[in-house]
Amino acid sequence: MRVLMFGWEFPPHISGGLGTACFGMTQALAKKGAEIIFVLPRVEGSAGQNGFLRMRGASGTPVSQQVAESMAVAGQDLWASSIRCLPVESPLVPYLTPQGYAEALEYLRQGPQCTVTSQCVGHIPGSYAHAVSGGESVTFELHGGYGPDLMTEVHRYSRLAAAIAVQENFDVIHVHDWMTYPAGMLARALTGKPLVAHIHATEYDRSGLNINEQVAGIERAGLNAADVVVAVSRLTRKTVIERYGAAPEKVVVVHNAVARHEAQRHYLVPERIRHEKRVLFLGRVTFQKGPEYFMEAARLVLQKIPNVRFFMAGSGDMLPELIRRAGQLRIGKRFHFAGFLRGQDVDRMFALSDLYVMPSVSEPFGITPLEAMLYDVPVLLSRQSGVSEVLEHALKADFWDTTDMADKICAVLRYPCLAAELVKNCREEMKSIRWENAAHQLLTIYRDVIGGH
């Protein structure tokens, strides 16, 4: 089985759960004999050194005249009929960090057009927008190796990725999330190979009802063009069918997983903090992840158990607002912002925690609770998360019910026997939540779609 896979992040250069999922998924597929060609926008450093797959970067890929003409014909129908490709007046890129915001805004200050439109201000932390715009209208573009705007770059990536598709020998195309859907559609049109569209998160998950219509349009086009849609949870499957009109019979669920061997169990709790309990939030500090509900629950817990430390690890557009909010609530001495963590810092944060909380407003799956459980850390999940479908014994609360959330945090911290029982039960559940099982499901999907194509 030869798989041409399109994605936009892969370890060690990752911004969120998608890169982690792609790594576990491809490794498990390779162990079962699949050959995978993974196409990224760029391949840097050790990202191309994984022995179980071959990686290619779309940057610098030559496009022949013949391929360009074929793209013009195929792409005209694909883009014109289903996707409106318009510029985004924003420096926003997926999972942009505060440092990224600062760099983009510094670029604007030094550029010839130093302005920020009303559309842009909505995506920039208030302090940055006020400092740069001064209340005046401004326009700017993306920079740093990408095209002049995100949609243009998505279109350019699709053309380069399709050029790779023409050069390679493969059986099936597998694309991950909306930025790679146009690439998959174009590759399918040029090669006639079947297309599997993996949906890890929808625009409705990221933005609620205030969606970006361009992004949603690309998602709709890709999901409907695919021969099979792979959703990471039953929750996501429901969204794909109801919001995007995908045919129910072609939408299948393959839950994400985690590998037990990924845990590094050599982190000891320092003596100076062993008398304190530690509660962790780790994820993007954005609307979708519900960080404000975590902070409100922390406020309620500290009223009952003062000797607790809360950690928020991650970055995102809500970070400046929450830092100010912590000051207003006077919990700054007990609520710490760890910033965006990578590698061993993530492992250490999990290992030193007494409880992991994921209060997401809308979480298609959510792989971080599984990572926390690798370190035998009990977890409290939002009921609005896909991972709650596979973790029956985890504590659960509605994201908006901060009182219930706080009560359950207090229960875990006060009663070690409860925490131990949660860990024991989840450890049993983890035995069946393996990437090998997901890979088996995917290979079955590949064979079925190839046989019926």
Image: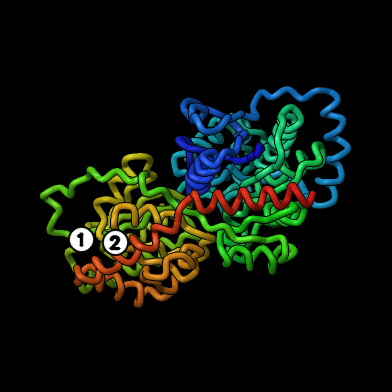
Q: Quadrant of the N terminus?
A: top right
Q: Is residue 284 visible?
A: no
At label 1, the amino acid type is: Lys
What is the x, y in percent for residue 337?
A: 32, 51
Sequence-wise first label, 1 or 2: 1
Q: Which residue is mark 1?
A: 277
Query: In the displayed structure, does residue 171 sit left or right of residue 396?
Result: right
Category of crowding for the residue at label 2, using alpha-carbon neighbours closer than 10 angstroms: few (below 14), some (14–19), many (at least 20): many
Kind of element beneath mark 2: strand
What is the x, y in percent for residue 409?
A: 29, 69
Q: Which mark is residue 389?
A: none
Q: Which residue is mark 2?
A: 355
Q: Is residue 5 above or below residue 283?
A: above
What is the x, y in percent for residue 141?
A: 63, 38
Query: In the displayed structure, does residue 306 sit left or right of residue 438?
Result: left
Q: Is residue 24 above or below residue 71?
A: below
Contact check, label 1 and label 2, Cβ < 8 Å: yes
Category of crowding for the residue at label 1, using alpha-carbon neighbours closer than 10 angstroms: few (below 14), some (14–19), many (at least 20): some
Kind of element beneath mark 1: strand
Look at 53% across and 34% down and name the residue there.
Answer: 109
What is the x, y in percent for residue 127?
A: 45, 49
At label 2, the amino acid type is: Leu
Q: How is the image coloured?
A: rainbow
Q: Is residue 444 above or below residue 299?
A: above
Q: Is residue 11 above or below residue 240?
A: above
Look at 15% across and 53% down and name the residue there.
Answer: 273
Residue 161 position by quadrant: top right
Look at 36% across and 61% down and name the residue there.
Answer: 325
Q: CA distance from mark 1 to mark 2?
A: 9 Å
Total residue callouts: 2
